[in-house]
Image (spheres, rainbow, N blue to C red):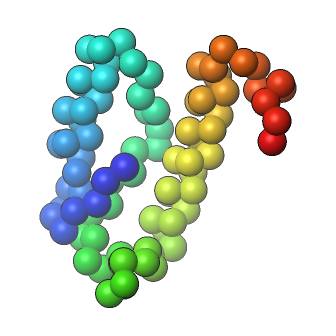
Amino acid sequence: MGASPGAIGTARAQNHLRQILVGLDLFPLNQPEVTIAGAARRFDEKGNLIHEPTKQLIYEQLKNLVDWTHRISLTPASEVIS
């Protein structure tokens, strides 16, 4: 996940990081990719995210992170205390 004032919103940096993680045989979360372009328009002056579609995308990424963590965990998700 990344944000930048530019048009591609950290996409190149994330792609490079993904290459490094795969090379180290780690398990990056593949979807959704969160690249926040034009960050100045998506956050208020206090740094709060105000762009609803971006909030939803981040929510989806966090939900997928939980699911992904359960899938690669040594402990089955059914045994994890919520």
Of residue 27 and residue 12, the one placed in the foreground of this image is: 27
Q: Quadrant of the C terminus?
A: top right
Question: Where is 4 relative to 33, above or below?
Answer: below
Of residue 40 and residue 26, the one placed in the foreground of this image is: 26
Q: Quadrant of residue 73?
A: top right
Tell whether 34 sits left or right of 3. Answer: right
Residue at far front of view: 81
Q: Residue at x 56, y 48 (%)?
A: 62
Of residue 1 and residue 38, the one placed in the foreground of this image is: 1
Tell whether 22 sits left or right of 77. Answer: left
Tell whether 53 sits left or right of 17. Answer: right
Q: Residue at x 19, y 32 (%)?
A: 16
Q: Residue at x 44, y 32 (%)?
A: 30
Question: Where is 54 relative to 40, above or below?
Answer: above
Question: Where is 14 relative to 24, above or below?
Answer: below
Q: Quadrant of residue 38?
A: bottom left
